[in-house]
């Protein structure tokens, strides 16, 4: 008679390796991307004068807003869709303000 408990068992890894780590990021962006887009857009507007940081934040806000607006949650929920649109608009305004600032302040730097 054999006792199964005597043999060591290998425990499964609590975090299975995802072959596509980008898919987890995209899933997170689809769930909460509209809020993230608004936050990045607002930060891009506030930091437009920091020689490029506002532009980078604005481009990130535009990208996150596009991903969030194309998700199924945004299609079903009008509020999420509008928040994603506001994030895209804020990011666009931040990019434009940052570019105008660089064009004006760049030659004097």
Image (spheres, rainbow, N blue to C red):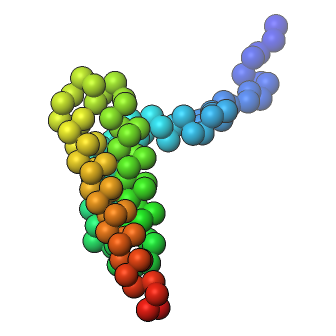
Q: For residue 68, which quarter of the picture?
A: top left
Q: Nearer the viewer, residue 52 or 102?
A: 102
Extreme residue toward the top, this view: 1
Residue 40, position in %: x, y?
34, 58
The spot of residue 10 in percent (x, y) is: 73, 30
Rendered residue at 33%/56% (across/down): 91
**Res 34 quadrant in image:** top left
- Decide: is 14 above or below 55: above
The N terminus lies in quadrant = top right
Front-lying residue, 73 or 67: 67
- Residue 51's place in the image compared with 92, above or below, is below
Furthest residue in direction bottom, as rendered: 108
Can residue 7 be seen in this snapshot? yes
Above or below, 52 relative to 29: below
Quarter of the rendering containing residue 30: top left
Q: x, y (%) of residue 58?
A: 38, 59
Tell me the residue at 45%/63% (across/down): 56
Query: Which residue lies most toward the right here?
Result: 1
User: Can residue 43 be seen?
Assistant: no
Left or right for 32, reference 63: left
Q: Position of residue 104 (x, y in %)?
A: 37, 81
């Amino acid at each position: 008679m054999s006792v199964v408990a005597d043999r060591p068992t290998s425990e499964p890894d609590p975090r299975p390796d995802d072959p596509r780590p980008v898919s987890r990021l995209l899933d997170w962006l689809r769930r909460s991307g509209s809020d993230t887009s608004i936050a990045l857009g607002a930060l891009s507007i506030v930091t437009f004068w920091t020689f490029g940081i506002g532009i980078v934040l604005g481009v990130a806000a535009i990208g996150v807003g596009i991903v969030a607006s194309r998700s199924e949650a945004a299609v079903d929920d009008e509020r999420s869709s509008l928040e994603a649109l506001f994030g895209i608009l804020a990011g666009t305004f931040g990019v434009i303000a940052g570019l105008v600032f660089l064009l004006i302040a760049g030659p004097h730097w």
